[in-house]
Image (spheres, helix red, strand yellow):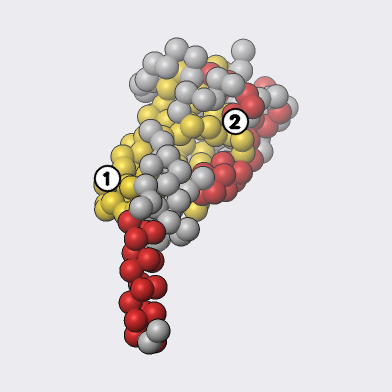
Amino acid sequence: MSRIYKYILFLFFGLLLFSCGSKVEIYEWVRLDYFTINAQSRDTLGSDTNIHYEDYAMLVQLNPISFTTVSSSDWVQAGEGFQAKNRIVILEVRTITDYNEAKPAGKLMNDVMVASFIEEGDQPENRVSLDDFISEFGKKSNRIEDGFEIYFRDGGGFASPCAGYNDPEKIQACSDELKQFDIFIQLSNGTKFTGTTFRVNLTNE
Protein backbone atom coordinates (compact mmCIF):
# COMPACT_ATOMS: atom_id res chain seq x y z
CA MET A 1 0.00 0.00 0.00
CA SER A 2 1.49 3.31 -1.04
CA ARG A 3 2.28 6.00 1.52
CA ILE A 4 -0.16 8.42 -0.16
CA TYR A 5 -2.95 5.85 -0.07
CA LYS A 6 -2.31 5.17 3.63
CA TYR A 7 -2.44 8.89 4.35
CA ILE A 8 -5.75 9.29 2.51
CA LEU A 9 -7.21 6.27 4.33
CA PHE A 10 -6.07 7.59 7.71
CA LEU A 11 -7.53 11.00 6.96
CA PHE A 12 -10.83 9.45 5.85
CA PHE A 13 -11.25 7.41 9.04
CA GLY A 14 -10.22 10.38 11.15
CA LEU A 15 -12.91 12.55 9.61
CA LEU A 16 -15.43 9.72 9.93
CA LEU A 17 -14.78 9.30 13.64
CA PHE A 18 -14.95 13.04 14.23
CA SER A 19 -18.21 13.39 12.33
CA CYS A 20 -19.80 10.57 14.33
CA GLY A 21 -19.47 12.47 17.62
CA SER A 22 -22.25 14.36 19.37
CA LYS A 23 -22.83 17.94 18.37
CA VAL A 24 -21.46 20.45 20.87
CA GLU A 25 -22.50 24.08 21.01
CA ILE A 26 -19.59 26.40 21.75
CA TYR A 27 -20.72 29.56 23.52
CA GLU A 28 -19.09 32.82 24.44
CA TRP A 29 -20.09 35.33 27.10
CA VAL A 30 -20.46 38.90 25.93
CA ARG A 31 -22.44 40.28 28.87
CA LEU A 32 -22.96 39.36 32.50
CA ASP A 33 -25.87 40.77 34.54
CA TYR A 34 -25.76 41.23 38.30
CA PHE A 35 -28.67 41.16 40.76
CA THR A 36 -29.05 41.07 44.52
CA ILE A 37 -31.75 38.72 45.79
CA ASN A 38 -33.28 37.22 48.90
CA ALA A 39 -31.94 33.66 48.72
CA GLN A 40 -34.99 32.33 50.58
CA SER A 41 -37.86 34.04 48.74
CA ARG A 42 -35.96 34.56 45.44
CA ASP A 43 -37.18 38.17 45.38
CA THR A 44 -34.96 40.80 43.76
CA LEU A 45 -33.69 43.40 46.22
CA GLY A 46 -33.76 47.12 45.54
CA SER A 47 -31.80 49.92 47.17
CA ASP A 48 -32.13 50.45 50.94
CA THR A 49 -33.63 46.99 51.54
CA ASN A 50 -33.23 45.47 55.00
CA ILE A 51 -32.13 41.82 54.95
CA HIS A 52 -30.28 39.39 57.19
CA TYR A 53 -26.82 38.79 55.77
CA GLU A 54 -27.34 35.00 55.66
CA ASP A 55 -30.36 35.51 53.36
CA TYR A 56 -28.49 37.86 51.04
CA ALA A 57 -27.21 36.62 47.68
CA MET A 58 -25.54 38.15 44.64
CA LEU A 59 -26.83 36.56 41.45
CA VAL A 60 -24.54 36.60 38.40
CA GLN A 61 -26.64 35.95 35.30
CA LEU A 62 -24.73 34.44 32.38
CA ASN A 63 -25.85 35.40 28.88
CA PRO A 64 -24.22 32.82 26.58
CA ILE A 65 -24.22 33.58 22.85
CA SER A 66 -23.79 30.65 20.45
CA PHE A 67 -20.39 30.92 18.79
CA THR A 68 -20.22 27.75 16.68
CA THR A 69 -21.21 24.08 16.60
CA VAL A 70 -18.66 21.26 16.44
CA SER A 71 -18.66 17.49 16.85
CA SER A 72 -17.42 16.06 20.13
CA SER A 73 -14.04 14.34 20.14
CA ASP A 74 -11.19 13.61 22.52
CA TRP A 75 -10.47 17.33 22.76
CA VAL A 76 -14.08 18.59 22.74
CA GLN A 77 -16.17 16.69 25.26
CA ALA A 78 -19.92 16.72 24.79
CA GLY A 79 -20.68 17.07 28.50
CA GLU A 80 -23.97 18.91 28.75
CA GLY A 81 -24.09 19.43 24.98
CA PHE A 82 -22.46 22.83 25.13
CA GLN A 83 -19.44 24.54 26.63
CA ALA A 84 -17.88 27.96 26.87
CA LYS A 85 -15.30 29.26 24.46
CA ASN A 86 -13.52 30.97 27.38
CA ARG A 87 -13.83 29.89 31.00
CA ILE A 88 -13.96 32.11 34.07
CA VAL A 89 -10.52 32.28 35.71
CA ILE A 90 -10.96 35.10 38.25
CA LEU A 91 -13.92 35.92 40.48
CA GLU A 92 -13.52 38.64 43.11
CA VAL A 93 -15.93 40.44 45.42
CA ARG A 94 -14.81 43.64 47.16
CA THR A 95 -16.69 45.73 49.66
CA ILE A 96 -17.21 49.37 48.68
CA THR A 97 -18.20 50.34 52.22
CA ASP A 98 -16.82 49.30 55.61
CA TYR A 99 -18.28 45.83 56.14
CA ASN A 100 -16.74 45.07 59.53
CA GLU A 101 -13.46 45.67 61.37
CA ALA A 102 -11.55 43.10 59.27
CA LYS A 103 -13.20 44.16 55.99
CA PRO A 104 -12.91 47.95 55.55
CA ALA A 105 -13.86 49.62 52.27
CA GLY A 106 -11.91 48.18 49.32
CA LYS A 107 -11.12 44.87 51.04
CA LEU A 108 -11.43 41.56 49.19
CA MET A 109 -14.36 39.49 50.53
CA ASN A 110 -13.59 36.13 48.89
CA ASP A 111 -12.57 34.39 52.11
CA VAL A 112 -15.97 34.99 53.76
CA MET A 113 -18.09 34.14 50.73
CA VAL A 114 -19.21 30.97 48.97
CA ALA A 115 -20.90 30.23 45.64
CA SER A 116 -23.16 27.71 43.93
CA PHE A 117 -25.05 27.41 40.66
CA ILE A 118 -28.46 29.09 40.58
CA GLU A 119 -31.01 27.59 42.98
CA GLU A 120 -28.57 24.91 44.18
CA GLY A 121 -27.44 27.00 47.13
CA ASP A 122 -30.36 26.00 49.34
CA GLN A 123 -28.35 22.83 49.96
CA PRO A 124 -25.28 23.79 52.04
CA GLU A 125 -23.18 21.01 50.51
CA ASN A 126 -23.50 22.73 47.12
CA ARG A 127 -21.85 25.91 48.38
CA VAL A 128 -18.08 26.11 48.02
CA SER A 129 -15.47 28.83 48.38
CA LEU A 130 -15.16 31.23 45.46
CA ASP A 131 -11.75 29.88 44.47
CA ASP A 132 -12.96 26.27 44.60
CA PHE A 133 -16.09 27.20 42.67
CA ILE A 134 -14.09 28.68 39.80
CA SER A 135 -11.78 25.65 39.79
CA GLU A 136 -14.70 23.21 39.62
CA PHE A 137 -16.53 25.40 37.10
CA GLY A 138 -13.58 25.09 34.73
CA LYS A 139 -13.23 21.33 35.17
CA LYS A 140 -16.77 20.57 34.03
CA SER A 141 -16.09 21.35 30.35
CA ASN A 142 -16.58 25.04 31.18
CA ARG A 143 -20.22 24.08 31.48
CA ILE A 144 -22.82 26.70 30.79
CA GLU A 145 -25.45 27.31 33.43
CA ASP A 146 -28.02 30.05 33.81
CA GLY A 147 -25.58 31.64 36.21
CA PHE A 148 -24.40 31.36 39.77
CA GLU A 149 -25.01 32.89 43.17
CA ILE A 150 -22.66 34.24 45.82
CA TYR A 151 -23.52 34.08 49.52
CA PHE A 152 -21.91 34.93 52.82
CA ARG A 153 -20.31 31.95 54.53
CA ASP A 154 -22.29 30.43 57.40
CA GLY A 155 -20.96 30.50 60.92
CA GLY A 156 -20.72 34.20 61.73
CA GLY A 157 -17.28 35.52 62.62
CA PHE A 158 -15.95 37.98 60.07
CA ALA A 159 -18.64 36.91 57.61
CA SER A 160 -21.01 38.87 59.84
CA PRO A 161 -21.52 42.61 59.20
CA CYS A 162 -20.02 45.00 61.74
CA ALA A 163 -18.22 42.18 63.60
CA GLY A 164 -15.02 42.90 65.52
CA TYR A 165 -15.71 46.45 66.68
CA ASN A 166 -15.46 47.17 70.40
CA ASP A 167 -16.19 50.89 70.29
CA PRO A 168 -19.99 51.43 70.52
CA GLU A 169 -19.74 54.47 68.23
CA LYS A 170 -17.99 52.44 65.52
CA ILE A 171 -20.54 49.66 65.86
CA GLN A 172 -23.35 52.17 65.46
CA ALA A 173 -21.67 53.90 62.51
CA CYS A 174 -21.14 50.56 60.77
CA SER A 175 -24.72 49.47 61.45
CA ASP A 176 -26.08 52.73 60.03
CA GLU A 177 -24.09 52.44 56.79
CA LEU A 178 -25.67 50.61 53.88
CA LYS A 179 -23.45 47.88 52.39
CA GLN A 180 -22.40 47.69 48.74
CA PHE A 181 -20.06 45.44 46.76
CA ASP A 182 -18.13 45.30 43.50
CA ILE A 183 -17.97 42.03 41.53
CA PHE A 184 -15.06 41.40 39.15
CA ILE A 185 -14.88 38.52 36.67
CA GLN A 186 -12.14 37.73 34.16
CA LEU A 187 -12.27 35.14 31.39
CA SER A 188 -9.37 33.05 30.15
CA ASN A 189 -9.03 35.26 27.06
CA GLY A 190 -8.57 38.37 29.21
CA THR A 191 -12.11 39.73 28.87
CA LYS A 192 -13.20 41.49 32.07
CA PHE A 193 -16.65 42.14 33.53
CA THR A 194 -17.51 44.30 36.52
CA GLY A 195 -20.73 44.97 38.37
CA THR A 196 -21.86 46.89 41.44
CA THR A 197 -24.66 45.81 43.77
CA PHE A 198 -27.39 48.02 45.19
CA ARG A 199 -26.77 49.43 48.65
CA VAL A 200 -28.66 47.39 51.24
CA ASN A 201 -28.90 47.28 55.01
CA LEU A 202 -27.39 43.94 56.05
CA THR A 203 -28.34 42.84 59.54
CA ASN A 204 -27.06 40.04 61.77
CA GLU A 205 -30.08 39.79 64.03
Q: Amino acid at mark 2?
A: Arg
Residue 35 is left or right of residue 155, and the answer is left
In the rendered image, the quadrant that contains the C terminus is top right
Label of residue 127 in the image:
2
Residue 183: x and y in percent read: 45, 42
Q: Residue at x 62, y 24 (%)?
A: 124
Q: Provide the secondary structure element on which disc 2 rests.
A: loop
Upstream in sequence: badge 1 or badge 2:
1
Q: Amino acid at mark 1?
A: Ile
In the rendered image, the quadrant that contains the N terminus is bottom left
Which residue is more in the foreground, 85 or 202? 85
Callout 1: few (<14), some (14-19), or many (20+) C-alpha neighbours within 10 Å? some
Alpha-carbon distance for marks 1 and 2?
Answer: 27 Å
Q: Provide the secondary structure element on which disc 1 rests.
A: strand
The answer to whether residue 4 shows anywhere in this view is yes
Residue 151: x and y in percent read: 54, 29
Residue 180 is left or right of residue 154, and the answer is left
* Image position of 31 with respect to 54: above or below: below
* Image position of 205 with respect to 126: above or below: above
Residue 141 is left or right of residue 15, and the answer is right
Residue position marked by numbered label 1 in the rendering: 65
